[in-house]
């Protein structure tokens, strides 16, 4: 018997609809997803569990994704971070890459692109 452990992803997005969509996409791709909808909850959950990847939106009622990334990087410099945002301005994209994220995905969410990008970052061989 082969025991496989699913890789864990923390998804932090202020939209419940986006959390549900990303959960569906990534569960279908074989990942275990935990979702929260605020910077405060994102930081709390990130500190309390081990994740293989963080998937973070940029704008929340209680702060920004930039602040969350900075606070996560204070205790976890290695876990990959992917930003998923509808803000596609060049200046935002440049700032996201400057803070050391591995990828920037745009909204509206493209299910194949999300799953493919995360699989590539995590070194998984997923069939699409």
Image (tube, rainbow, N blue to C red):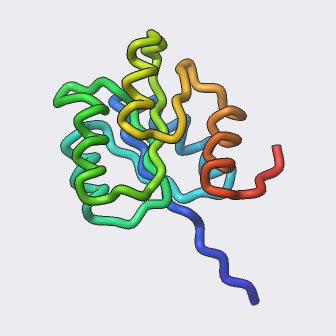
Q: Is residue 17 above or below residue 28?
A: above
Q: Is residue 80 above or below residue 66?
A: below
- Seen at 45% across and 39% down, the residue is 101
Left or right: 124 as drawn, with respect to 83: right
- Seen at 54% across and 35% down, the residue is 103
Horizontal and vertical percent position of residue 91:
40, 13
- Seen at 52% across and 30% down, the residue is 104
Q: Is residue 15 visible?
A: no
Q: Is residue 81 above or below residue 57?
A: below
Tell which of 20 and 78 is nearer to you.
78
Extreme-front residue of the structure:
98
Extreme-right residue of the structure:
127
- Seen at 26% across and 40% down, the residue is 68
- Residue 57's image quarter? top left
Horizontal and vertical percent position of residue 127:
82, 50
The quadrant of the image that shows the N terminus is: bottom right
Horizontal and vertical percent position of residue 47:
26, 60
């Amino acid at each position: 018997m082969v025991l496989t452990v699913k890789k864990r992803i923390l998804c932090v997005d202020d939209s419940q609809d986006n959390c549900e969509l990303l959960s569906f996409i990534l569960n279908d791709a074989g990942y275990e997803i935990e979702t929260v909808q605020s910077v405060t909850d994102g930081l709390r959950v990130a500190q309390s569990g081990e994740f293989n990847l963080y998937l973070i939106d940029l704008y929340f009622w209680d702060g920004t994704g930039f602040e969350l990334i900075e606070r996560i990087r204070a205790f976890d410099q290695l876990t990959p971070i992917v930003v998923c945002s509808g803000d596609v301005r060049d200046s935002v994209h440049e700032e996201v890459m400057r803070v050391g994220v591995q990828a920037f995905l745009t909204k509206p969410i493209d299910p194949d692109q999300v799953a493919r990008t995360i699989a590539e970052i995590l070194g998984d061989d997923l069939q699409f």
